[in-house]
Amino acid sequence: MPLTHLGNMPVSTFLRDYWQQKPLLIRNAFPDFESPLDGDELAGLALEDEVESRLVLEKGKTPWELRQGPFEEDDFAALPPSHWTLLVQAVDQWVPEVQELLHHFRFLPDWRLDDIMVSYAVDQGSVGPHFDYYDVFLLQGNGKRRWRIGQTCDSQSPKVEDTALNILQDFEGTEDWVLEPGDMLYIPPGVAHWGTAEGDDCITYSIGFRAPSVADIFTELSQDIASRLTNDQRYRDPALAPSENPGEIPADTLNALDALIQSHLTPEAIQDWFGRYMTTPKYPDLEPEVAEENGEDWTGVPNLERHPASRFAYCAEGDQATLYVDGEQYSCSRALAECLCADIAPETRELKASAQSEQDIALVSELVEAGKLWA
């Protein structure tokens, strides 16, 4: 179930006072927490071609050396006894027990979720002082990690040279905490932080929430709109008046240009693009495969479960909705869209009850056949 409190703090208070504003340490956020993975299992994932993984060595061939996976077993055998970290992305898509952690964070929109990255660090292992452009919850899985919180940064903050990582040149520590299993730290975008394994090996689960840059929004939205326009659609000025100075761009021209842009930049176009864009899988190679079974067989199972790589969201107006799944859009009833998006594993009886038409039933069957829902 989604968390209702972060420690003793109601989620509503957290969203009002901390979300995207300032860090928060939550002691014992997950009481008696046991890590679903150990270091050997994480290293095993890093051997796979399909898995994105990295090694960071503070004292490698260069300061803060970055090595990209996939790795070989001999790569790990040759590592020093301290000062290195293994990071594996999207572990929630490979390990069901890790994916279950996502249920607790559904007090935030699904479409904001990036993935769960898991890091394994030996004594003094770290990825250095840095900042991120996204919100992240850092859940301690086992061992201890010291977290130092620093200043607010941006793209102009000086970085260490001669490394592929964005290591901050200057770090101004303001808080210093040691996290143990079950403790969790929230870091908003732009806040410098520096985590270091203390003593024994440690594992940390990073639950990240993405937000597109304004540059990406303009680029992707404009390209999406442009892809549906033809070469026949052009700027026109049939009521052109004689110009006093042919070098002047008059206000009437700029107003006409603004009207032309606004005619395509409609709320419907923005919704359509945003729904598809924010549900597009981060790793297309992990998209669901077409199921062998008939999609109609879902009516006889107790639950349907989303494929771990699939993203669901919807926009509604009245009794109707547009459902967005993995970058595609579908028309259905609002009741069905709400049911499909309310739970990662919706009950079949609830889906049947929410289906308002044969079109709704056919849509669920289509999603099952496409492998986006598992029967």
Image: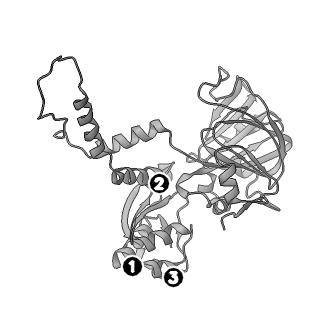
> Around disc 3, counting alpha carbons within 10 Å, would you say few (fewer than 14), some (14 to 19), or many (20 or more)?
few
Residue at figure coordinates x 65%, y 38% from the top left: 54
Amino acid tagged 1:
Gln
Rendered residue at 73%/55% (across/down): 37
Secondary structure of residue under mark 2: helix
**Residue that badge 1 annotates:** 356
Tell me if mark 2 has few (under 14), some (14-19) or many (20+) residues whose alpha carbon lies within 10 angstroms of its own: many
Residue type at mark 3 is Arg
Left or right relative to 345: residue 319: left
| Marks 3 and 1, how far apart at CA | 13 Å
Query: Which is more toward the observer, 161 or 173?
Result: 173
> Closer to the camera, 8 or 41?
8
Q: Earlier in the sequence, mark 3 or mark 1?
A: 3
Q: Which numbered disc covers residue 201? A: none
Element carrying mark 1: loop
Disc 1 crowd, CA 10 A, few/some/many (<14, 14-19, 20+): some
Quadrant for the N terminus in the image: bottom right
Q: Is residue 294 visible?
A: no
Q: Which residue is mark 3?
A: 349
Amino acid under disc 2: Thr
Please provide percent x and percent y for residue 268: 34, 54
Location of residue 70 with respect to 128 vertically, above or below = below
* Residue 345 visible in rendering: yes
Instruction: Measure the C-alpha gap from mark 2 to mark 1.
Output: 24 Å
Q: Is residue 11 above or below residue 294?
A: above
Residue 303 lies, in percent from the top left, at 55, 76
Of marks 3 and 1, the one in the foreground: 1
Residue 279 - label:
2
Q: Which element carries disc 3, helix, strand or loop?
A: helix
Q: Is residue 79 above or below residue 119?
A: above
